[in-house]
């Protein structure tokens, strides 16, 4: 068997078998569901959020956006908290912890007021589960002052974290909403009030698509629809940004992060971990493909880490943070021009179109030979052509040139020369990943 | 006007195939293509493709791994189940196995599972990723006779369990049918060599130019401490038909024709006008070989119809695309010759009173093969009238320390992938036998 790195990792004092968890959502709503995921290899579950009153749900309640022939890339969900009796859910969590003592079992709470938050925290703590997640972020709650309304208010966060703390001595994870500009502010408030970790993102308020006959958003609920939470692969870039923000915030140093948002394979998970998350949660990909996806997450990540020489996952956490810097600190005195491999080029002309219409008109097109040629004078090295080329490994990074220093010590706009003297090393990023 | 030799040939169509004899016919997938193909996969529940694989290579799982960008995990799935993953990716009769079971066929056409498997095994090789590592070989010694797919698979399985294995091969090259019996256009030699190297890297030793029963005897093996011996010698003898004139020069068999072509032997002469008799994959390999080795006309004679021919459909279409002629429902009646050399094949209709006369300087019998007679080499071994070993089940024979796998096993289906599975099963039987102290 291939070498596999150890994926076990600490989270708030709990030794997790691996960093792959179900997020608190429709996929973690019963004992049987959670159990099936844990049996498939998952490291733990965030059980579906409960409220003491069962919400009323609409039908249908999902929509999805697609692109060309892909499976859906984002998903809209209007479901609220658990529709099962409160007591039954508590029993399910108790049983999960009893039957899976080595898996991380976390209960997710959403109270209506301080008293309710505290009371629920007490109920949960008696179950013997490991931690509590405080849901400050569900964007589709139909009651005011719940869900993402809380996550946007420093006052409410402070009040509710303290209420939960009164009712429980378990580690607390505050689940934050991305429907806000600076997540650091509510996150700091949660930590200052007594939470130990942050999980994010919850879903993004969205409309995935419109109905062309009934002139409303999708899904159509008897002729009407609403804005609600979007999840899935398309949310990943936003989620990675928020995790990076949290991890780089000076006031949140040392606070463990749990990453969520569009994770469907080990590479997605690894990206969150590189950005500072010590574990990840997912739902939409499970709704699409089932719990079995965790098998390839475990296999893929552990093989990758072993091949890269990492002995334990912990060493990988936040490894990219030092290399993600403010845009004005980036070096801007060189350009990497693309090169075209004419043995591979099929003559589709897509690079020519994109360069003309979307970049710097730096590709010439020979219509007779159906052949693109890069004009080195005009090419600024943006590499748009490389991204649109549909042929594997056809357009790749090529010649590197440097701004010529003029007498004032500033680079001129036109003179670019190859560095044949110092042979300065420039790191070229990954560009061939399918 | 075109010159007289080309009369009747459409302009722009070459008489000679563009492809060289050593060139692989099907191009490899690039990573983009592999992702695209894998994303066509419906990711079935209890995937029928996996059930369709005789060697449990588990395509359902490895395609899913590709779909979820886990290429190394995919390599692990393939290699830990099928040591000859790269070979099977090229020679499997997919349409009857995994691809035949693919549910995507209900929408358009099956996932190209063989090509995906090839993509992953190539990826594994180019990245130098090593899936299998054998433990120290400290257990009882095991010998294999023949180095074809069944022995390679059994040897790798046993090596992974800590058994030292030695393979005895009579020829100068290991691989059996893989090195001698398939056209390189379908299975390049480097693929065979790399997979054999994979097996030897697990600690398996291969003794070449060593025929059991001639260079070394069964009793020697026992005396040298081999506690179990597996017979995986395949089918070395081509069947022929009793056709008048079959002793003429130029009349040969598939085994001989392919082996000579493949080992690039200097006395190999493809022939100018070649007639191949048979309708299976081996017949197609002979025809392809002839054509790619520059024969002017190649005709395949088959006694049944195209639909009844056991050959793989894709291969059949490919063979036709090379400009090879097919004559169905015809059987050879007589070979005529001049100066002891065949010149003409006369054939009669099997389902009509048709008759056909073909110019031929080479005639190749490809109507099936059978094993050589092992009754003297392994005394007392149970054989049927065609020399196949009458195994009981799971590769166990009537002699306690003798096991069997691959084509020579009467009970086996005669394909590479079935031999891989046969080798795995026989290895399990050997392990069980040795664990019980050789009883």
Image (spheres, coloured by chain):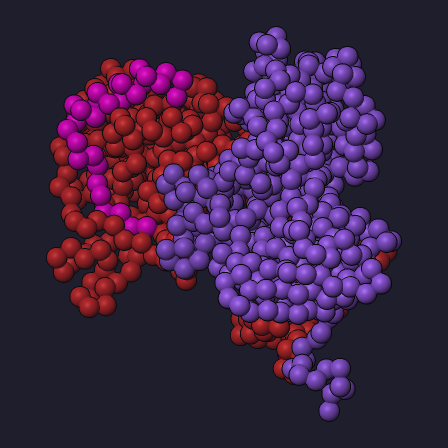
Chain colours: A red, B purple
Q: Of all residues shown, which one is farthest toward the bottom?
A: B1
Q: Residue at position x 31%, y 54% from top?
A: A64
Which residues are drawn in magenta? A75-103
Where does the image place residue A41, in percent across and percent down from the top left?
A: 42, 28
Q: Residue at x 41, y 62 (%)?
A: A68
**Direction from residue A216 to residue A391 in the image, left or right:** right
In front of the other: A51 or B310: B310
Locate residue B53, reporting x and y percent. 49, 40
Q: Which corner quadrant of the image does residue B19 belong to? A: bottom right
Instruction: Classify residue A25 as left or right of residue A243.
Output: left
Above or below A150: residue B132: above
Q: Quadrant of the N terminus of chain A?
A: top right
Front residue (pair B379, A40): B379
- Which residue: 69% across, 26% down? B375
Q: Is residue B354 visible?
A: yes
The location of residue A285, given as percent across then percent down, is 38, 43
Residue B268 falls inside the magenta stretch: no
Tell me if residue A90 is in the magenta stretch: yes
- The image shows a total of numbered marks equal to 0
In the image as oriented, which residue stretches furthest toward the top? Answer: B437
- Of residue B63 and residue B159, the one placed in the foreground of this image is B159
User: Which quadrant of the view contains residue B5?
Assistant: bottom right
Question: Residue at position x 27%, y 53% from top?
Answer: A63
Q: Position of residue B288 (x, y in %)?
A: 68, 59
Can you say whether A329 is above or below A276 in the image?
Answer: below
Q: Would residue B317 be seen by someone viewing this image from the given angle?
A: no
Q: Is residue B64 above or below residue A366?
A: above
The quadrant where residue A313 appears: top right
Q: For this rendering, which residue is in front, B169 or A99?
A: B169
């Amino acid at each position: 068997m291939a070498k596999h790195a150890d994926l076990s990792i600490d989270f708030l004092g709990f030794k997790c078998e691996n960093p792959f968890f179900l997020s608190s959502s429709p996929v973690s709503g019963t004992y049987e569901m959670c159990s099936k995921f844990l049996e498939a290899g998952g490291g733990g579950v965030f059980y579906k959020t409960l409220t003491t009153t069962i919400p009323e749900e609409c039908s249908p309640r999902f929509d999805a956006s697609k692109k060309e022939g892909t499976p859906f890339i984002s998903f809209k969900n209007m479901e609220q908290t658990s529709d099962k009796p409160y007591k039954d859910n508590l029993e399910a969590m108790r049983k999960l912890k009893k039957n899976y003592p080595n898996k991380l079992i976390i209960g997710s709470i959403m109270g209506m007021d301080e008293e309710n938050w505290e009371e629920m925290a007490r109920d949960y703590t008696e179950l013997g589960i490991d931690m509590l997640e405080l849901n400050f972020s569900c964007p589709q709650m139909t009651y005011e002052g719940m869900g993402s309304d809380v996550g946007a208010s420093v006052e409410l966060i402070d009040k509710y974290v303290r209420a939960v703390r009164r009712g429980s001595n378990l580690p607390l994870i505050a689940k934050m909403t991305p429907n806000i500009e600076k997540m650091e502010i509510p996150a700091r408030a949660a930590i200052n009030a007594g939470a130990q970790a942050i999980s994010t993102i919850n879903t993004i308020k969205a409309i995935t698509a419109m109905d062309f006959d009934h002139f409303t958003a999708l899904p159509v609920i008897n002729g009407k629809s609403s804005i609600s939470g979007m999840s899935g692969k398309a949310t990943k870039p936003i989620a990675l940004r928020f995790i990076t923000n949290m991890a780089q915030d000076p006031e949140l140093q040392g606070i463990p992060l749990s990453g969520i948002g569009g994770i469907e394979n080990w590479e997605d998970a690894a990206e969150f971990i590189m950005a500072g998350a010590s574990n990840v949660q997912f739902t939409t990909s499970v709704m699409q493909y089932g719990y079995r996806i965790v098998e390839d997450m475990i296999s893929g990540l552990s093989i990758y880490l072993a091949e890269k020489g990492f002995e334990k996952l912990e060493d990988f956490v936040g490894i990219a943070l030092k290399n993600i810097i403010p845009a004005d600190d980036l070096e801007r005195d060189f350009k990497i021009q693309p090169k075209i491999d004419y043995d591979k080029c099929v003559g589709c002309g897509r690079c020519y179109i994109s360069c003309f219409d979307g970049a710097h008109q730096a590709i010439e097109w020979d219509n007779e030979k159906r052949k693109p040629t890069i004009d080195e004078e005009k090419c600024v090295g943006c590499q748009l052509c490389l991204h649109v080329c549909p042929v594997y490994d056809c357009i790749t990074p090529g010649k590197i040139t440097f701004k010529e220093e003029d007498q004032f010590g500033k680079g001129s706009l036109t003179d670019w020369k190859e560095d044949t003297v110092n042979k300065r090393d420039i790191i070229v990023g990954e560009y061939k990943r399918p | 006007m075109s010159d007289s030799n080309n009369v009747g040939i459409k302009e722009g169509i070459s008489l000679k195939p563009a492809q060289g004899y050593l060139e692989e016919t099907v191009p490899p997938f690039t990573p983009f293509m592999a992702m695209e193909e894998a994303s066509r996969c419906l990711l079935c529940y209890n995937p029928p493709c996996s059930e369709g694989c005789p060697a449990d290579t588990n395509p359902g799982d490895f395609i899913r791994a590709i779909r979820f960008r886990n290429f190394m995990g995919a390599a692990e799935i393939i290699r830990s189940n099928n040591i000859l993953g790269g070979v099977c990716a090229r020679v499997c009769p997919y349409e009857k196995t995994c691809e035949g079971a693919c549910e995507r066929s209900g929408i358009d056409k099956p996932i190209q599972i063989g090509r995906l498997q090839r993509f992953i095994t190539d990826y594994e090789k180019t990245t130098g990723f090593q899936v299998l590592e054998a433990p120290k070989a400290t257990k009882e010694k095991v010998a294999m006779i023949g180095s074809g797919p069944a022995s390679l698979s059994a040897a790798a399985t046993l090596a992974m369990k800590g058994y030292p294995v030695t393979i005895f091969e009579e020829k100068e090259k290991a691989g059996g049918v893989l090195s001698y019996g398939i056209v390189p256009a379908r299975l390049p030699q480097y693929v065979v060599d790399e997979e054999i190297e994979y097996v030897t890297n697990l600690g398996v030793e291969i003794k070449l130019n060593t025929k059991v029963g001639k260079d070394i005897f069964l009793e020697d093996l026992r005396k040298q401490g081999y506690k179990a011996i597996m017979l995986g010698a395949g089918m070395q003898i081509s069947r022929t038909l009793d056709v008048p004139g079959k002793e003429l020069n130029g009349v040969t068999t598939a085994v001989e024709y392919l082996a000579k072509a493949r080992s690039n032997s200097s006395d190999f002469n493809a022939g100018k006008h070649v007639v191949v008799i048979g309708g299976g994959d081996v017949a197609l390999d002979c025809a392809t070989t002839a054509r790619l080795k520059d024969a002017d006309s190649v005709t395949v004679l088959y006694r049944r119809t195209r639909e009844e021919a056991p050959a793989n459909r894709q291969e059949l279409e490919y063979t036709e695309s090379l400009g090879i002629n097919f004559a169905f429902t015809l059987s050879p009646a007589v070979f005529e010759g001049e100066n002891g050399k065949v010149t003409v094949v006369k054939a009669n209709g099997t389902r009509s009173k048709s008759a056909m006369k073909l110019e031929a300087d080479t005639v190749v019998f490809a109507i099936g093969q059978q094993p050589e007679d092992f009754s003297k080499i392994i005394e007392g071994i149970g054989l049927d009238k065609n020399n196949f070993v009458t195994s009981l089940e799971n590769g166990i024979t009537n002699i306690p320390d003798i096991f069997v796998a691959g084509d020579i096993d009467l009970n086996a289906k005669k394909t590479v992938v079935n031999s891989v599975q046969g080798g795995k099963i026989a290895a399990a039987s050997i392990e069980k036998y040795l664990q019980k102290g050789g009883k």
